Image (spheres, rainbow, N blue to C red):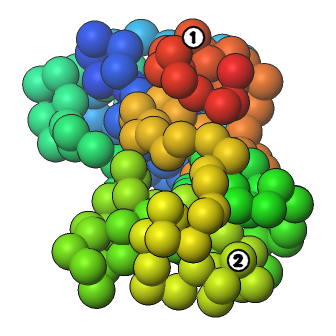
Amino acid sequence: MSERILRLDKAGTPVEWLDWQAAATLYARGLVTWTLGDVIYRLRGGLCRVTGDRSRLSLHSIIACDGLASPRRRTRPPLTNRALFRRDQHVCLYCGKSFPESQLTRDHICPTSRGGRDHWLNVVAACRRCNQHKGSRLLEEIGMELLALPYVPNMAEYLALINSHRIRGDQMAFLRNQFGKDSRLL
């Protein structure tokens, strides 16, 4: 069992990916308020001593849980190289060539040595050659240009980026409806 389950808050905002064990715990505790998508796991438990019935649990691909609406809501998703490279579609935003993840680097548009910060709006995917050529200089100092502007993905986009190799069609359709207008994933 390796398919992930998309957890939403009760307002329908994407929160995180769950494995089937964590989702089963939420179901068993009565915290799942509504579901979407297909049933992707059917679990069978033990027999009830009183009735003799076997417990059964059907886990859907998308579940919304009771409680506070996004109790640990993030204002920005965490910046990771994997999510960054997928945001930029594995393309060096200086030369425009596609590269495998292992050949891309995180480049700071305004270098950290010049006060640039490590956040979504100041980093792009770059091949090693372009990153070394740029070094710790500003783009205007060496006549380089960005092929696309960086942006901060919202949580729906971020969840699609970090799980894109294992995401189900019904989950992607749900997430895609919540992507930002600047998304390159549309």
Image coordinates for residue 81, horizontal then vertical, percent: 55, 69
Quadrant of the snapshot with the C terminus: top right
Q: Is residue 101 visible?
A: yes
Image coordinates for residue 125, horizontal then vertical, percent: 63, 64
Q: As shown in the figure, which amino acid type bears the numbered disc 1? A: Asn
Choose mark 2 or mark 1, whichever is in front.
2
User: From the viewer's perspective, is residue 18 above or below residue 11?
Assistant: below
Label 1, secondary structure: give it: loop
User: From the viewer's perspective, is residue 68 above or below residue 141?
Assistant: above
Q: As shown in the figure, which amino acid type bears the numbered disc 2? A: Cys
Q: Nearer the viewer, residue 118 or 63?
A: 118
Residue at 18% over, 22% down: 69
Residue 185 located left or right of residue 64: right
Image coordinates for residue 113, horizontal then vertical, percent: 28, 86
> Distance between the Cα atoms at labels 2 and 1?
35 Å
Quadrant position of residue 34: top left
Residue at 57% over, 72% down: 142
Q: Nearer the viewer, residue 107 or 71?
A: 107
Q: Is residue 48 visible?
A: no
Label disc, if present, on residue 177 of the rendered structure: 1
Q: Nearer the viewer, residue 102 or 54?
A: 102
User: From the viewer's perspective, is residue 14 above or below residue 94?
Assistant: above
Quadrant position of residue 122: bottom left
Q: Nearer the viewer, residue 166 or 50?
A: 166
Q: Residues within 10 Å of mark 1 (few under 14, many from 20)?
A: few
Residue at 55% over, 60% down: 124
Name the residue that disc number 2 marks: 130
Image coordinates for residue 101, horizontal then vertical, percent: 76, 72
Q: Residues within 10 Å of mark 2 (few under 14, many from 20)?
A: some
Label 2, secondary structure: give it: helix
